[in-house]
Image (tube, rainbow, N blue to C red):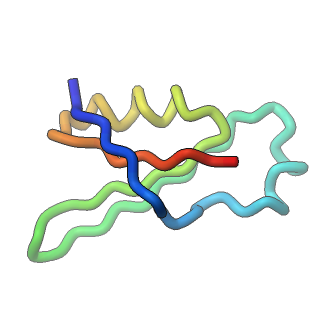
């Protein structure tokens, strides 16, 4: 299981104006970036548990997370 770390900021991939278009709450958005330092997978979801399960299947050492609200 990955080590979860709380961070102050992670860029939003889902904007507030999209909430109304997805009332069922199933929207998940993923961004994947590859550079010399490795692979970065950034995710945003209405339901955090869905995103956490997805990210954990990738087998990372750590998952950075921020509190919303």
Question: 40 left or right of 53?
Answer: left
Task: Identify the residue at horizontal 22%, vertical 42% (top origin).
Answer: 62
Question: 14 left or right of 58?
Answer: right
The percent coordinates of residue 3 (x first, y second) are 23, 34
Question: 4 left or right of 10?
Answer: left
Please identify the quarter of the rendering in which residue 25 is found. Answer: top right
- Front residue (pair 69, 16): 69
Task: Identify the residue at horizontal 59%, vertical 43% (top origin).
Answer: 45
Q: Quadrant of the N terminus?
A: top left
The percent coordinates of residue 37 (x first, y second) are 11, 70
- Front residue (pair 32, 49): 49
State the residue lying farthest toward the left: 36
Question: Residue 8, relative to residue 44: is it above or below?
Answer: below
Task: Identify the residue at horizontal 90%, vertical 49% (top origin).
Answer: 20
Question: 54 left or right of 66?
Answer: left
The percent coordinates of residue 5 (x first, y second) are 31, 43
Task: Identify the residue at horizontal 17%, vertical 75% (top origin).
Answer: 35
Count of labels shown? Answer: 0
Please identify the quarter of the rendering in which residue 14 is found. Answer: bottom right
Question: Residue 5, relative to residue 41: is it above or below?
Answer: above
Question: Residue 24, relative to residue 18: is it above or below?
Answer: above
């Amino acid at each position: 299981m990955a080590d979860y770390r709380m961070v102050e900021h992670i860029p939003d991939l889902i904007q507030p104006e999209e909430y109304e278009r997805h009332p069922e709450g199933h929207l998940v958005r993923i961004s994947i970036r590859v550079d010399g330092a490795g692979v970065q997978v950034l995710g945003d979801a209405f339901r955090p548990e869905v995103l956490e399960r997805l990210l954990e299947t990738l087998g990372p050492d750590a998952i950075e997370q921020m509190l919303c609200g």
